[in-house]
């Protein structure tokens, strides 16, 4: 199975400051169609996960533009340009190129 | 409104069975691949199973031979038949819809249904 490794696992951030989460895959997620099959999800406290970013860098509908995704192959990054209080929760990356699809361990973002 | 609503969870003894359901609304259910994802209490997300629009299926290794995913497009419903349940199957089970954007991302999730396997 593809192993997804996130860092850091805990991320305390001051509101208004930027934040960055790394996600590394044990296998190349670049498909022959030119897309990286890497998605980012946020699970807010007490809620179901919600899609933030798909195919590495595309924001899902309704996602604020302070969220951005980058990377290719095995190394990916989720960035939040200015963290807001509503961004707290656990962020997961997921690879969708190989089954079983696999998630990172999750990164818990908290407000300082 | 696009919505997924799971049901069928509960308490079951080891070795027992449960059938989860996911009712879809607000979109053309038959046009989208569907998935089950689970989350043990305090743990991360684990992909469980997939069913394509053509009825093709796939499973994570730990549930192969025990779980069966299916869909009824006429009833806009997704199912997960879980047999020979183990304590490690205890989790919140979410159904999720693949988005139209490609890349197999899950753009809509249900609220989850709780499965507890315990004697």
Image: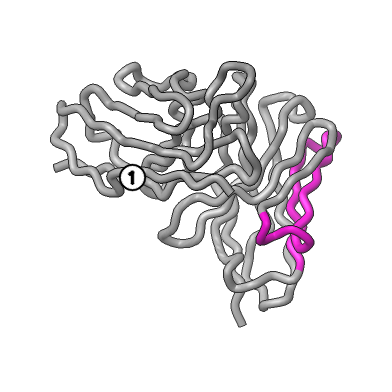
Residue at image point 72% right, 28% down: B32
The answer to whether residue A86 is left or right of residue B58 is: left
Q: Residues within 10 Å of mark 1 (few under 14, many from 20)?
A: many
Observer-nearest residue: A54 or A50? A54
Snapshot quadrant of residue A52: top left
- Which contiguous range is marked in magenta? B61-83
Q: Which residue is mark 1?
A: A107
Coordinates of residue A87 in the picture (x, y in percent): 29, 34
The answer to whether residue A32 is left or right of residue A26 is: right
Coordinates of residue B59 in the picture (x, y in percent): 71, 50
Observer-nearest residue: B54 or B7? B54
Observer-nearest residue: B1 or B95? B95
Coordinates of residue A75 in the picture (x, y in percent): 40, 32
Relative height, residue B118 to residue A27 (above, below)? below
| Magenta span contains residue B70 | yes
Chain of residue at mark 1: A
| Magenta span contains residue A73 | no
């Amino acid at each position: 199975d593809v192993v997804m490794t996130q860092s850091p696992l805990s991320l305390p951030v001051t509101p208004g400051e930027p934040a960055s989460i790394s996600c590394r895959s044990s296998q190349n997620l670049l498909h022959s169609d030119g897309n990286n099959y890497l998605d980012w999800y946020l699970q807010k406290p007490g809620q179901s996960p919600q899609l933030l970013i798909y195919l590495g860098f595309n924001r899902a509908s309704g996602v604020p533009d302070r969220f951005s995704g980058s990377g290719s192959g095995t190394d990916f990054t989720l960035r939040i340009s200015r963290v807001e209080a509503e961004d707290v929760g656990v962020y997961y990356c997921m690879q969708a190129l190989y089954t079983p699809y696999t998630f990172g361990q999750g990164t818990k973002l908290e407000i300082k | 409104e696009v919505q997924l609503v799971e049901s069928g969870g509960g308490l079951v003894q080891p070795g027992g069975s449960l059938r989860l359901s996911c009712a879809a609304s607000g979109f053309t259910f038959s046009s989208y691949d569907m998935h089950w994802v689970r989350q043990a209490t305090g743990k991360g997300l684990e992909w469980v199973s997939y069913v394509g629009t053509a009825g093709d299926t796939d499973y994570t290794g730990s549930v192969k031979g025990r779980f069966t995913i299916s869909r009824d497009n006429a009833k806009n419903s997704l199912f997960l038949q879980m047999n020979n349940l183990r304590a490690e199957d205890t989790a919140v089970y979410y159904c999720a819809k693949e988005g139209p954007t490609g890349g197999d991302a899950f753009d809509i999730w249900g609220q989850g249904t709780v499965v507890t396997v315990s004697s």
